[in-house]
Structure formats: structure tokens, C-alpha cells
Image (spheres, helix red, strand yellow):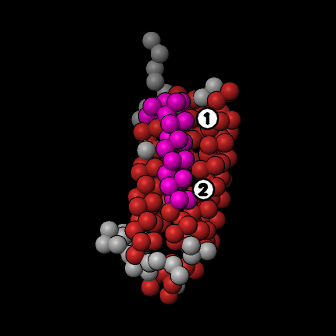
Amino acid sequence: MSRTPRTRHGRPSIDPASRPHLIPSARHLVPTALATAACATAGSLATRESVDSAWFEALDKPGFYPPTWAFPAVWSALFADIAVTTAKALDALPREERAALLRSLALNLGLNAAWCWTFFGRREVALSVPVAAALTISSARLVRRVGRAKARYGVALAPYPAWCAFATVLSLAISARNPED
């Protein structure tokens, strides 16, 4: 009869290798975390001056515009979700499907940063709408690719395209309320 190894506190010891569904490999998590962190940094560089600017304050925003504090909270959670779920998918996918997922992730993060630079960096609100729509489509495709590895990974990433769709609607509403000259 084998005994379960115990910690010094008497609790069963858990070998991380026995829980691969919870912990992505560093081989995949490090690059996906670095890529999402780079995207987040690029986005924050575009937004940091505009969010507190007279230009942004003067924009007529719809009644469903969330409080300003919600954006960094939601995006931090989403970027962590993207890094972990794509790393887990890379762990689980056959080698021949990994490159397609990495291309999908790169395109998605590029569109994500592009939206920030279009809306906040260049202050092109109308132009940000199709970029946000492309980001939403790309996010849905990323969910589909991640879900090919395991359905639960796709489910875990599903809030991302939902938030991007909300951002598209929000960008459209702000654009409609603030026609550019």
C-alpha cells in the first residue's frame, strides 16, 4: 500500500507535475506573458496622457461608459487570462498547431495595441471603431484556437472577445456623439 507524501503540516503534498491542467509550462508561459506585458505597456503608453487630458474629459460619453478605474482592472485580468490560457493551449496543442496559435496571438496583441494608439494616441475616435471591430473578431478567433486545445481554455478566454465587443460598441457610441471636424 502506497502512502501519499505529506507536508510538514500533515497535509497531502501536491506535486506540480501532477496538476498540469493548472500550471502552464514556463516554456510557453514566459513568452505569452512577455508578449501580453509588451502589449499592455504599449497600450498604457498611448493612454496615460490622454485619459487625464482635457480632450478626453471633453468627449461626450454614453451613459453606459464604465467608471475610469474599471478599465485597468479589467485589462489586467484579461491580459493575465490571455497569457495563461494561450500558454496552456500551447502546452496541449500538437506541434503543428502551435505556430498558428502564436500567429493568432501576435495579430491579436498587435490589434489591441493599435486600438489604444488609434483612439488615445492619435485621438482618431472614428478610426478606432473598425480597429476595435477587427480586435473583437481576432479575439473570437483566438478563443476558438485556444479552445481547440481544450474547451475549458476557450471558455476561460471568452470574456476577452466579450469585452472587446463592448469596447467596439463604446467606441462607436463615442464616435457618434463626437463627430470629428
Q: Amino acid at mark 1?
A: Leu
Residue 46 falls in which quadrant of the image?
A: bottom right
In the image, farthest residue toward the front: 181
Task: Depth check: give the residue in front, 133 or 13.
Answer: 133
Look at the picture and state if 19 lies above or below 132: above
Most common secondary structure along the magenta stretch = helix
Residue holding disc 2: 111
| Image x and y of residue 137, in percent | 51, 47
- Magenta-highlighted residues: 130-153
Q: Residues within 10 Å of mark 2 (few under 14, many from 20)?
A: many
Residue 124 seen in the current view: yes
Residue holding disc 1: 90
Residue 40 seen in the current view: no
Mark 2: secondary structure: helix
Look at the picture and state if 59 lies above or below 13: below
Give the foreground label among 2 and 1.
2
N-terminal-most mark, 2 or 1: 1
Q: Residue drawn 50% across and 63% down?
A: 129
